[in-house]
Image: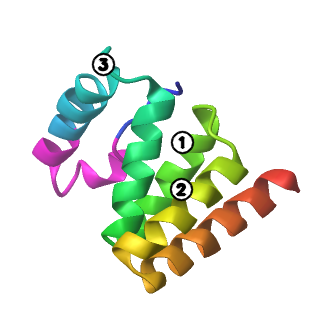
Amino acid sequence: MAKQSAPQELAGIAPKLVEITNEVLFQDVWERPGLSPRDRSLVTVSVLAALYRSEQLSYHLGVALDNGLTVQELSEAITHMAFYAGWPSAMTAITQLKKIADERAA
């Protein structure tokens, strides 16, 4: 898994938020042995898509691809999620996935 970190440009306005994001979320939670990075990415993408957190979703779709999930697997998860979290959330997520997949294919 690629090392993740909070955007450093945010440290000027919210240094503690950046610090705990890096130390607690990315250095502790994401590194726990109970789930692989691939599985953590699948959970994270699913939750972000379901909750319509599209600003964070784009970043984590890229991380999910880097962690070994395929575009097809992410597409299937988003399609499945549509029936539980709502069509608009799924359509937004799949649109973002297509954009990222197209960028990586170019």
| Circle 2 SS class | helix
Q: Earlier in the sequence, mark 1 or mark 2?
A: 1
Marks 1,2: beta carbons within 8 A: no
Identify residue type, mark 2: Ala
Using residue 91 as the reference point, say whether residue 81 is left or right of it: left
Name the mark on residue 77.
2
Using residue 26 as the reference point, say whether residue 76 is left or right of it: right
The residue mark sitting in front, 1 or 2, is 2
Q: Earlier in the sequence, mark 3 or mark 2?
A: 3
Q: Which residue is mark 1?
A: 63
Q: Picture coordinates of residue 67 (x, y %)?
A: 57, 32
Q: How is the image coloured?
A: rainbow
- Real-space Cα separation, disc 1 to disc 3, in angstroms: 18 Å
- Real-space Cα separation, disc 3 to disc 2, in angstroms: 21 Å
Q: Picture coordinates of residue 33 (x, y %)?
A: 32, 14
Is residue 73 shown in magenta? Answer: no
Quadrant of the snapshot with the C terminus = bottom right
Q: Which residue is mark 3?
A: 34
> Image point 15% across, 36% down: which residue?
20
Identify residue type, mark 1: Val
Identify residue type, mark 3: Gly
| Circle 3 SS class | loop
Q: Residue furthest top?
A: 33
Q: Residues within 10 Å of mark 3 (few under 14, many from 20)?
A: few
Q: Picture coordinates of residue 31 (x, y %)?
A: 33, 20
Q: Picture coordinates of residue 77 (x, y %)?
A: 53, 56
Is residue 8 shown in magenta? Answer: yes
Range of the magenta residues?
6-18
> Image point 45% across, 65% down: which residue?
81
